[in-house]
Image (cartoon, coloured by chain):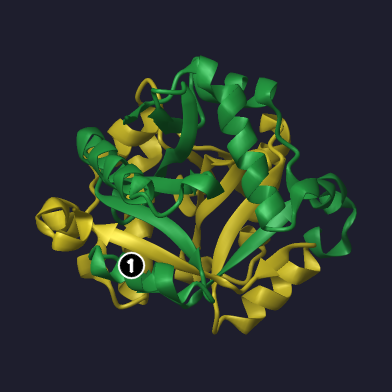
Chain colours: A yellow, B green
Amino acid sequence: MVEIRDGKIEDIPQVFELVNELAVYEKAPHEVDNSIEEMIKDGFGDNPSFGLIVAEDTSINKIIGIVIHYIRYSTWKGRCLYLEDLIVTEKRRGEGHGLKLFNAYVEKGQQLGVNQMMWQVLDWNTPAIEFYKKLGANIETEWYNCKLEKDGIETFFNNKATK
Amino acid sequence: MVEIRDGKIEDIPQVFELVNELAVYEKAPHEVDNSIEEMIKDGFGDNPSFGLIVAEDTSINKIIGIVIHYIRYSTWKGRCLYLEDLIVTEKRRGEGHGLKLFNAYVEKGQQLGVNQMMWQVLDWNTPAIEFYKKLGANIETEWYNCKLEKDGIETFFNNKATK
């Protein structure tokens, strides 16, 4: 029996395993700078930086899927809910847990009264793009993501272009 | 004299004027569903959904530019600061206020101890893309934005694909 529910602080070690599983699958395990301790602090402090939904197989007390979400703000639309990650452990894919987790994410947005739900998809992931379109999503292809990473932040003010 | 500082609740009416100015410039004034009252509630309540930096021309008590930012969460990188909007009123462009506001945004990220700064740029906006590259930003071109808008949220669970 798989239960979909809000995540708890004691779920984080298993959640972090899933985060790392995805990173290995995407051939980028070295990109994970996060830790269990950080995730506990960031998700369960006074002003949490994210919310967590989990799919737990209660017969084995195992978290088999997660959604990480948080509020974003659009100056035009107001409060939006962003789906940062939806992960189902590789062995348990194809059983419908991904769709259930996605539904739980939309329910969360309704509860929070947001004006928009948002997420991203990789341009080569045609099955996912088609799936999202069927769910009623609009797909925008004209935006690029810009990032200033940790080393870039540190050296930013030494750069002539910032003067 | 133009002062860059954190925004205050009493700045919001002028901030909202700038938000609308941008929408008119982008030929989408009908897309603005937000209001002064909502922005005050969302930005200055117990758990604010955004942070605000303003550029004020103190000689005329006028807000001529703004940055709207908020914390996002990456499961791999932890807490990140996202630049939602950087707006300088049309008449005051070319005086260097945009760069000063961008610098203030990076300073804010340093103060908050985030691991990454993020924003988006339109794919046709070559001068902005070149400018961001000079500042040390990485530009990712392979992600699409997905959105479920207000009407889509309302009808979501009536859709066969969500079952």
Q: Which residue is mark 1?
A: B131
Q: Residue at x 44, y 66 (%)?
A: A145
SS class, disc 1: helix
The image quadrant of residue B59 is top left
Q: Position of residue A72 (x, y in %)?
A: 54, 42
- Between B5 and A22, the one nearer to me in the picture: B5
Q: Residue at x 36, y 75 (%)?
A: A25
- Between B161 and A163, the one nearer to me in the picture: A163
For the residue carrying disc 1, how many other residues have a C-alpha within 10 Å: few (<14), some (14-19), or many (20+)? some
Q: Is residue A104 visible?
A: no
Where is A74 relative to B117, above or below? above
Tag 1 subunit? B
Callout 1, which amino acid? Phe
Where is B142 relative to B120, above or below? below
- Between B14 and A82, the one nearer to me in the picture: B14
Where is A112 relative to A136, above or below? above
The image quadrant of residue B34 is top right
Give the quarter of the figure containing the N terminus of chain B.
top left
* A4 relative to B1 in the view: left or right: right
Give the quarter of the figure containing the C terminus of chain B.
bottom right
The image quadrant of residue B119 is bottom left
